[in-house]
Amino acid sequence: MQRNAEKNTIAVLDFGSQYSHLIVRRMRELGVYAELLSPETPSEKLQEFSAIVLSGGPQNLSASDALQADPKLYALGIPMLGICYGFQLMAHQLGGEVRAGKTREYGPACVTVATRSPLFKGLPRSEPTWMSHGDQVTRVPNGFKITARSEVCPIAAMEDRKRRLFGIQFHPEVKHTTHGMKVLQNFVRITGAKHTWRLGKDWIDKTVADVRAQVGMGRALCALSGGVDSTVAAYLTHRAIGKKLTCVYVDTGLMRQGETEQIKRTFAKLPKLDFRVVHAEREFLKALKGVTDPEQKRKVIGRLFVRLFEREQTKLRRTDFLVQGTLYTDAITSGVSVGGKAAVIKSHHNVGGLPKDVAFRLIEPLRDLYKDEVRLLGRSLGVPEEIVSRQPFPGPGLAVRIIGEVTKEKLATLRKADAIFREELIVAGKAKQVAQYFAVLPDIRSVGVQGDARTYGHLIILRAITTADFMTADWARLPHTLLARASARITNEVAGINRVAYDITSKPPGTVEWE
Ligand code: XMP
């Protein structure tokens, strides 16, 4: 916990908006540390914060179970910003009025703002914003002034400047609100919070010292996936305890081309590290034999992974700690949006998903950080760029990109096609513009003609997506020349493939992976 003692942290109360984490990230981008907290956090606890943001949320205030904030918050004398549902809640709890609007407002909306408001200082009078609401504030509480309106919403913002209480109907944290960052910056200025949050040498030194103290005379084990989170966590822990750290990488045989070699190269650079590779391709293929159901596949892989890990654990004596690359987004379950009633779409498996009953105490040096912060940290720790900027890769690996039974031959085919697509995308300079890109091998054959002869070959599907958070995604509009090159190379260079298709499905209704 890096909260600093000078009351320099902003609390974001999470009422379940899909953008709650984004508010925290934006504050940190502005150099002010922020944390996401439960919407019902009592006012006594919130006293230690420099400001409070009430996030948006999916509920209507008219519902009998609508979430409320502790009403005593408003008397703390701490600056507050209510966003969307948070704005309506502030109005409601302070005696204003909120009603269902005649027209809902979803998506872009132009708002006219009072530029003399300290929150809107430096903004043009007419501001393109992002709205997502059905209810509206119809009367502001005593002491408040209306500071913005849109065509649909006559009260789109309010303020009580004296008490430093502000509310806005639109979402400043999303990119569609053109000057949203400026609004948040203005709010930070109003709060007087200092811009002291940096992931620099001080943070690293303190975290390294904490890990060293935590491990003491003991030893730690880190399960590496080859991804950025577990690698950065391992680098940081290695800096703290050096040879007392053992890193285990399970080569499942389900990795992409060159991945195992890459991780070996990366860790060979760390002096005195006990680095072990568990070669388990045969075991994984055996366990996956005859398994075609996607959920079953995920479960088989997850279970075997844990078994192999436990086997390594018994070989190591006096190892009391397990290092995990848990991130803030994984760790935090404060809001209503997290956990609970969400439908299970897929049983995600990753190294961080080891069972709770493994006999270790946890070291989670990244648990206050977001992915982009971890990438920055990785760079300053000297983690190779190919790992720092690596796109996400699912724990079950290529097994969820092969539809039907997984075999050694299919893995080899997919690995080759995937490597070609990745290579072409990188050469075309598109890698930074898409969040994830890969090949899929479905269980389909089709008739083709190659070298004047009839073929009855397999299909490769290419998928590339753009996304901010992987909860929703759009298919990437890649140049046709790039797709054409990838298609020609795959059909020429990968034996058995006579057709290539490009997936043009967004999420929803699809998901990123095919299984
Ligand atoms: P879906 O397919 O659920 O994928 O839309 C969203 C993101 O999650 C990744 N993914 C996984 N990551 N373990 C992981 O660590 C998994 O089991 C898993 N399944 C999907 C996927 O690659 C995408 O980035």
Image (cartoon, helix red, strand yellow):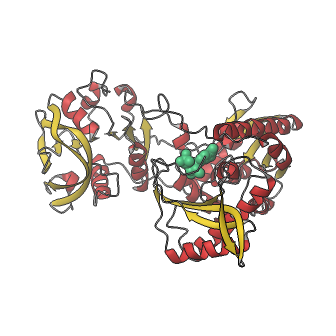
At a point 22% along the width and 36% down the height, the residue shown is 88
Please state the horizontal and vertical placement of residue 127, each as a whole percent of the image. 20, 59
- The residue positioned farthest toward the top in the image shown: 64
* Horizontal side of residue 398 vs 367, given as left or right: right
At a point 24% along the width and 32% down the height, the residue shown is 89
Residue 397 vertical position relative to residue 387 in the rendered view, above or below: above
* Horizontal side of residue 414 vs 309, given as left or right: left
Please state the horizontal and vertical placement of residue 176, each as a whole percent of the image. 31, 57
Q: Total of numbered circles in the picture?
A: 0
Tell me which corner region of the image, top left, top right, bottom left or bottom right, holds residue 365. top right
At a point 45% along the width and 47% down the height, the residue shown is 509
Please state the horizontal and vertical placement of residue 18, each as a whole percent of the image. 40, 43
Depth check, front residue: 473 or 297: 297
Residue 167 vertical position relative to residue 407 in the rendered view, above or below: above
At a point 61% along the width and 52% down the height, the residue shown is 204
Note whether residue 305 is visible: yes
Depth check, front residue: 264 or 116: 264
Note whether residue 215 is visible: no
Please state the horizontal and vertical placement of residue 321, each as a whole percent of the image. 74, 36
